[in-house]
Image (cartoon, rainbow, N blue to C red):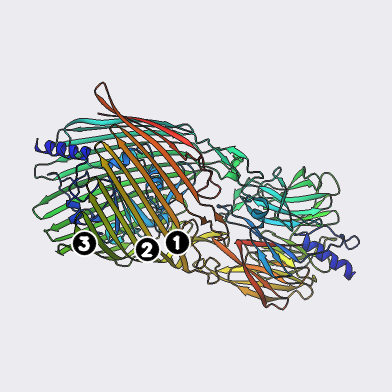
């Protein structure tokens, strides 16, 4: 059981945000080279995304590997990504919308997907298919003055041919995804939408929302017991049983309103969340990474800084990765040990946000 | 009759290139101390009995570098924008988002909003955004220009941290009907048509100008975001604009001059996509600008005292998709000057009311400004001139410190055709946060005004011997800018913040050499700037960019031009070097590039009328480059123009 879980955790971390798995049918074990592709989202108007490569063996960073490998620039922002079992990184780009598929170890461009994408957010690889959540281009303005992308959808692609197979609507502001058996869980404004992907209709099974949890869902992670944890930036985290689709518990813990990204630790016993606070003059005041115990449902502050915009955990070392960011300057990558102490820091690109381990 | 005679004589002197000893007639004449000015005879310094205005504020900036651009220098680029001119003629950096697209000047590494740009004293910047798009300013309408490097808020008001560009129109007082028609055509569907007519009876002068220009801008470029860097044709980069300028000048019985000006510019411009969005029609957009400016003024003088008053109104309107950013600006100002042989004292005051019309501002937002300044210049003995200035501004919902300046110029050598002057200046300048800074999406009244302390010094040298003449200058400067405003992310929104300290220091140098033999004249003009601008104290102490050169600030910039005139022919060319620079990412280094132009001018008469034909090939090496990353710039292209002057 433990072996199955560890493989699940490893694979889940590898296939960010998460991959398909059940207790009975875990995905194959994968090996890691202790390398980290670091996504620097870039400034939206400057389309200045870049990719850095961090080696946990040497603790050294190499910036702008995409440009070095290909002689061209990405020319977009990268909002998320995932590394496939064969060590290809799928980079989800906005402005323009595309998915760049690169060789993770070198940054060499292998393929570009442009069809079926409208403000894509996250990608989930599941064997012969992969899913991409899209906000869509249509929007309404809610009472608070924020845009809501009310025609969000999932694009389904053939993993082998990279061709678009299908698109289906899922609600508003589609973001993170997870797959458990034949059920695709999608974080949307309405809650967690559960889609049955075993039939061609991709019908909705349920929409899950914990009582008292307002606002939209953002991201999803598995814990050591294969339960889902979903971030709701307005309130905290919700624990869901992926089989019964019931809410098991909730934790009111700070979650970043902008991003809402969460990630389990190496063992799946903790879920990391983070939040950056701004003062009345809109200056970042304090950024904190919180560690939520999935058993006791309590949380502690794990690491602090000024302005965080993402978090990652190495499946090889358990090291936590985050960065001090500014979208008008370079980020400062911070690698934190399992005991919460800073191990090293390095200059990275603009808006460092995601960490893809392979 | 006397006036007409004066002009005739002056014109003849200019055409024949006759000078007082020690001074040459370069395309851009360096402003210099009074002694030097008195030796120079060109269109800039001709004295006429019509002068009824106070001394221009630039005359008090004796310790700083001033480039006075006369009409003759503007002539060959009249179909172009101010952006094109700066890009060719000045080493200040211009950030360009494509041909004819947004172009913003950076003087000594400062931002576009740190350089004031005005027309006859009326600001051309949009008050909501606080900066001027130089591609929106057609050279055709203007008669002269001063580029004041380094600037000074004491002279030009808040905002002059990096520099100041003062555009001018003025009456010619030439009796009768004069004017010109200019037509121009070039690559990428570029067409320009302009017409000007001046009517004068020597008491009243009317100047009317219109222009219309269009471009398709469908040029090819190398796409550096696609494998293999394929060559594509640019989409969605067309523009068309038209403009009207009407001015009236009248001499009234007491010797004063009454003036009225009206300027209207209309731009309908597609927004050039980045190369990675060139094939994404869903991302295409356009922007539509209208700028209306009008003013009425009165100037007079009596013995040692000169005075003037101006009232002006402007309306700036920009529409992007469904968003409108507009503002009404009302200004009234008055100034007076007392002048003796050795001493000049000038003072002024002004009041401004701005009412923005912006959906992201609260309806109650407005701005009132009150301005008072005092400038003085004193020449205790011939080699030494001292000047000082002080300005104070009161403004709604913000504060500005006192803005003083102190300048010194000393002539070190004036012998055997050689003149050498040393100059020095120290000034404190400031800039109030723009309306967008303070009110876009809420009230951001926590913002501090941007402040700079600038010290600079330099040498000016000129030499004249027989048919040779030369001018050279070198300037060293240090400018500390505190509370520089930048927009930064604050969760789901972006908000302006003050960067504690930015330091700019560097050097500027220029050399002009002219040789004349009979009807043949050849001149070389070079300008170089070294700019080192870094964030000393960032908002966030661990910022990796601390101590690094700011984004889009080349350390090295060089402009060199050569012109040869023989009879009715002129051959001209230029080489323009822009050094490496980074984007916001300090590891993202943009390559340097060199552009070169070559042009030919032919002046001829037909049916008794005077014509000038001008042809130029730009970027003759067909260099592929991007000034701003991902924004394609044109390869080799041409432009032909024909001007009829009557």
For marks 2 and 3 on the same chain, the one whose residue lies earlier in the sequence: 2
Q: Position of residue B407 (x, y in %)?
A: 25, 64
Judging from the image, what secondary structure is the residue with disc 1 in?
Answer: loop
Residue B484 appears left or right of B282 = left
Gap between marks 3 and 1 measured at Cα: 51 Å
Query: In the rendered image, which quarter contains the N terminus of chain B?
Result: top left
Q: Nearer the viewer, mark 2 or mark 3?
A: 3
- Where residue B443 is drawn, which disc sits there? 1
Q: Are marks 2 and 3 on the same chain?
A: yes
Disc 1 crowd, CA 10 A, few/some/many (<14, 14-19, 20+): some
For marks 2 and 1 on the same chain, the one whose residue lies earlier in the sequence: 2
Judging from the image, what secondary structure is the residue with disc 3 in?
Answer: strand
Q: Can the viewer see residue A121?
A: no
- Whether B126 is drawn above or below B616: the answer is below
Q: Position of residue B53 (x, y in %)?
A: 17, 49
Q: Are marks 3 and 1 on the same chain?
A: yes
Q: Nearer the viewer, mark 3 or mark 1?
A: 3
Residue A226 appears left or right of B329 = right
Name the residue tied to disc 2.
Answer: B397
Gap between marks 2 and 1 measured at Cα: 10 Å
Q: Residue at x 21, y 44 (%)?
A: B42
- Where residue B411 is drawn, which disc sits there? 3
Please state which of residues B520 and B437 is positioned toward the viewer in this rendering: B520
Judging from the image, what secondary structure is the residue with disc 2 in?
Answer: loop
Residue B336 appears left or right of B329 = left
Please state which of residues A187 and B290 is positioned toward the viewer in this rendering: B290
- Whether B232 is drawn above or below B394: the answer is above
Total marks shown come to 3
- Whether B165 is drawn above or below A303: the answer is above
- Where residue A94 is drawn, which disc sits there? none
């Amino acid at each position: 059981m433990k072996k199955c879980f560890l493989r699940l955790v490893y694979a889940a971390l590898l296939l960010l945000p998460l991959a398909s798995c059940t207790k009975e049918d875990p995905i194959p074990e994968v090996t890691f080279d202790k390398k980290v592709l670091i996504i620097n989202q870039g400034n939206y108007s400057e389309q200045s995304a870049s990719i850095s490569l961090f080696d946990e063996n040497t603790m050294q960073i190499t910036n702008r590997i995409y440009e070095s490998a290909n002689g061209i620039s990405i020319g977009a922002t990268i909002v998320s990504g995932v590394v496939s079992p064969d060590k290809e990184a799928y980079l989800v780009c906005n402005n323009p919308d595309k998915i760049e598929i690169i060789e993770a170890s070198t940054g060499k461009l292998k393929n570009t997907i442009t069809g079926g994408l409208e403000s894509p957010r996250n990608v989930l690889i599941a064997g012969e298919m992969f899913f991409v959540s899209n906000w869509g281009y249509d929007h309404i303005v809610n009472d608070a003055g924020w845009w809501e992308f009310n025609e969000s959808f999932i694009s389904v692609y053939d993993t082998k041919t990279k061709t678009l197979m299908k698109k289906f609507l899922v609600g508003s502001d589609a973001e993170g995804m997870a797959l458990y058996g034949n059920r695709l869980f999608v974080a949307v404004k309405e809650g967690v939408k559960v889609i049955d992907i075993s039939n061609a209709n991709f019908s909705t099974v349920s929409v899950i929302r914990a009582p008292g949890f307002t606002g939209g869902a953002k991201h999803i992670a598995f814990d050591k017991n294969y339960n889902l944890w979903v971030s709701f930036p307005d309130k905290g985290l919700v624990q869901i049983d992926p089989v019964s689709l019931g809410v098991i518990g909730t934790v009111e813990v700070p979650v970043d309103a902008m991003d809402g990204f969460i990630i389990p630790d190496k063992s799946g016993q903790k879920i990391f969340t983070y939040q950056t606070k701004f003062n009345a003059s809109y200056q970042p005041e304090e950024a904190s990474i919180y560690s939520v115990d999935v058993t006791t449902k309590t949380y502690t502050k794990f690491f602090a800084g000024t302005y965080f915009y993402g978090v990652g955990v190495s499946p090889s070392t358990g090291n936590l990765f985050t960065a001090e960011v500014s979208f008008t300057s370079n980020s400062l990558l911070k690698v934190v040990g399992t005991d919460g102490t800073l191990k090293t820091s390095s200059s990275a690109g603009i808006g460092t946000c995601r960490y893809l381990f392979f | 009759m006397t006036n007409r005679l004066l002009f005739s004589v002056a014109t003849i002197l200019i055409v024949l290139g006759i000078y007082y000893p020690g001074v040459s007639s370069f395309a851009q004449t360096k402003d210099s101390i009074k002694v030097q000015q008195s030796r120079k005879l060109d269109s800039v310094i001709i004295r006429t009995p019509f002068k009824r205005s106070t001394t221009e504020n630039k005359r008090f900036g004796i310790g700083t570098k001033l480039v006075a651009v006369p009409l003759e220098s503007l002539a060959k680029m009249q179909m172009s924008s101010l952006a094109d001119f700066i890009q060719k003629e000045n080493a200040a950096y211009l950030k360009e988002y494509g041909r004819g697209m947004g172009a913003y000047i950076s003087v000594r590494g400062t931002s576009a909003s740190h350089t004031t740009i005005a027309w006859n004293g009326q600001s051309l910047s949009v008050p909501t955004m606080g900066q001027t798009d130089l591609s929106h300013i057609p050279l055709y309408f203007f008669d002269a220009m001063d580029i004041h490097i380094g600037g000074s808020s004491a002279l030009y008001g808040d905002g002059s941290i990096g520099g100041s560009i003062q555009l001018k129109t003025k009456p010619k007082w030439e009796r009768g009907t004069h004017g010109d028609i200019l037509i121009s055509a070039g690559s990428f569907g570029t067409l320009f048509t302009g017409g000007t007519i001046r009517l004068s009876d020597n008491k009243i002068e009317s100047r009317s100008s219109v222009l219309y220009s269009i471009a398709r801008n469908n040029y090819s470029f190398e796409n550096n975001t696609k494998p293999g860097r394929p060559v594509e044709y640019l989409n969605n980069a067309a523009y068309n604009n038209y403009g009207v300028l009407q001015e009236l000048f009248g001499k009234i019985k007491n010797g004063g001059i009454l003036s009225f000006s009206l300027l209207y510019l209309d731009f309908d411009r597609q927004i050039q996509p980045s190369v990675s969005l060139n094939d994404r029609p869903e991302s295409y957009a356009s922007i539509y600008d209208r700028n209306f400016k009008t003013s009425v003024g009165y100037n007079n003088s009596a013995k040692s005292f000169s005075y003037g008053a101006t009232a002006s109104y402007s309306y700036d309107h920009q529409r992007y998709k469904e968003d409108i950013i507009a503002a009404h600006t009302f200004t009234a100002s008055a100034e007076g000057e007392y002048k003796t042989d050795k001493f000049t004292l000038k003072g002024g005051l002004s009041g401004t009311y701005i009412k923005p019309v912006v959906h992201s501002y609260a309806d109650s937002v407005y701005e009132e400004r009150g301005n008072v300044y005092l400038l003085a210049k004193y020449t205790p003995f011939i080699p030494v001139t001292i000047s000082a200035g002080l300005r104070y501004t009161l403004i709604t919902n913000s504060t500005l410190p006192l803005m003083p300046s102190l300048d010194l110029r000393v002539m070190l050598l004036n012998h055997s055709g050689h003149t050498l002057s040393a100059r020095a200046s120290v000034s404190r300048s400031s800039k109030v946060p723009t309306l967008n800074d303070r009110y876009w999406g809420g009230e951001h009244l926590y913002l501090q005004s941007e402040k700079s302390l600038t010290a600079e010094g330099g040498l000016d040298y000129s030499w004249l011997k027989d048919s040779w003449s030369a001018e050279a200058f070198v300037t060293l400067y240090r400018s500390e800018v505190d509370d520089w405003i930048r927009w930064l992310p604050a969760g789901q929104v972006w908000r302006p913040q003050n960067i504690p300290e930015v330091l700019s220091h560097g050097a500027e140098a220029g050399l002009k050499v002219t040789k004349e033999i009979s009807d043949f004249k050849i001149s070389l003009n070079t300008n170089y700037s070294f700019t080192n601008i870094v964030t000393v104290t960032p908002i966030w102490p661990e910022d990796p960019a601390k101590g690094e050169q700011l984004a889009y600030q080349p350390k090295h910039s060089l402009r060199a031009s050569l012109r040869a005139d023989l009879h009715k022919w002129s051959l001209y060319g230029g080489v323009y070097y822009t050094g490496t620079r980074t984007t916001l990412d300090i590891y993202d280094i943009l390559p340097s590039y060199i552009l070169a132009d070559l042009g030919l001018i032919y002046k001829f008469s037909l049916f008794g009328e005077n014509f000038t034909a001008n042809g130029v090939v730009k970027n003759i090496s067909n260099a592929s480059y991007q000034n701003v990353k991902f924004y394609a710039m044109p390869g080799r292209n041409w432009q032909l123009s024909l001007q009829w002057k009557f």
